[in-house]
Image (cartoon, rainbow, N blue to C red):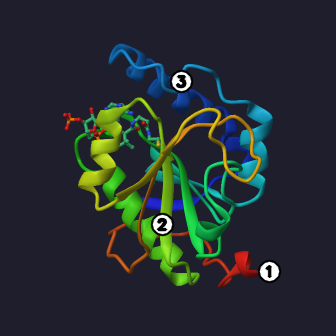
């Protein structure tokens, strides 16, 4: 399987992918991802080079967004002094579930974060989804804090999230990595 940066024409595929995940989440009784993701916002993240596709031939097996930009209102100024990369929108296609592809995508992200000099791989998971939180704990993440709507830090918007992190470290994820190596510490500027 190959991991590569998403291209603008992948927007449609990624939106369909998100819809597939949302339908599965609804079937589990979760309200996670019940609102459609705005296409313009997704395109902007693709153009910023932060969205990656896991391809199996012509099929998309998964996607992950990895960015140096923290979502406003979640992480404190103190935490943001520690160099970090943030994982968003990790998704594995249902037909590929159960093979720990998500774990390998997290290893790829941690390895890439390490290569650019980050100390932490961080994420925020759906506040009410304990099964998803258990998934991250089982993959070596530590719960940092749960931010609830109204507690936003740094004067950020009303957001919530179950914040977690693990050390960014080298890993053998086993994918053919076609994503150009990022410059070290782009976030240090
Ligand atoms: C999270 C994800 C990428 C992991 O992919 P994976 O490594 O192939 O792992 P699986 O899909 O087999 O899931 C592993 C376990 O976590 C559970 N799980 C994963 N995401 C979940 C979620 N959002 N809500 C509830 N349970 C979830 C699965 O049901 C499964 O449980 P089981 O072992 O009891 O069967 C994938 O499950 C997915 O796309 N989930 C939906 C989107 C999502 O929540 N992404 C995370 C955003 S922060």
Residue 56, position in %: x, y? Answer: 41, 50
Describe the element under mark 1 as helix, strand or loop: loop
Q: Is mark 1 within 8 Å of ligand 1?
A: no
Front tag of 3 and 1: 1
Q: Front-most of 116 and 59?
A: 116
Q: Name the residue under label 1.
A: 189
Mark pair 3, 1: CA separation: 36 Å
Residue 155, position in %: x, y? Answer: 77, 47
Earlier residue among tags 3 and 1:
3
Describe the element under mark 2 as helix, strand or loop: strand
The part of the image, by quadrant, that contains residue 18 is: top right
Q: Is mark 2 within 8 Å of ligand 1?
A: no
Instruction: Tell me: 181 left or right of 22.
Output: right
Disc 2 to disc 3: CB gap under 8 Å: no
Describe the element under mark 3 as helix, strand or loop: helix
Residue drawn at x 57%, y 27% as measured from the top left: 16
The part of the image, by quadrant, that contains residue 34 is: top right
Q: Mark 3 points at which residue?
A: 19
Earlier residue among tags 2 and 1:
2
Mark pair 2, 3: CA separation: 26 Å
Picture disc at residue 144: none
Q: Mark 2 points at which residue?
A: 121
Residue 156, position in %: x, y? Answer: 75, 45
Residue drawn at x 27%, y 44% as measured from the top left: 134
For the C terminus, the image quarter is bottom right
């Amino acid at each position: 399987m190959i991991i590569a940066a998403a291209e603008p024409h992948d927007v449609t595929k990624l939106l369909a992918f998100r819809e597939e995940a949302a339908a599965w989440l609804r079937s589990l009784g979760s309200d996670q991802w019940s609102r459609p993701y705005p296409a313009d916002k997704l395109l902007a993240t693709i153009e910023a080079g932060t969205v990656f596709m896991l391809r199996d031939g012509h099929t998309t097996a998964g996607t992950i967004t990895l960015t140096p930009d923290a979502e406003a209102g979640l992480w404190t100024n103190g935490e943001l002094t520690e160099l970090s990369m943030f994982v968003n929108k990790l998704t594995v296609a249902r037909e590929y579930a159960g093979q720990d592809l998500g774990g390998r995508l997290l290893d790829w992200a941690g390895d890439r974060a390490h290569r650019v000099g980050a100390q932490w791989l961080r994420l925020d998971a759906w506040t009410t989804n304990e099964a998803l939180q258990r998934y991250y704990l089982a993959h070596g993440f530590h719960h940092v804090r749960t931010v609830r709507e109204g507690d936003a830090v740094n004067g950020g918007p009303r957001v919530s999230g179950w914040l977690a992190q693990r050390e960014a470290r080298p890993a053998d994820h086993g994918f053919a990595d076609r994503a150009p190596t990022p410059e070290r510490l782009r976030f240090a500027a």
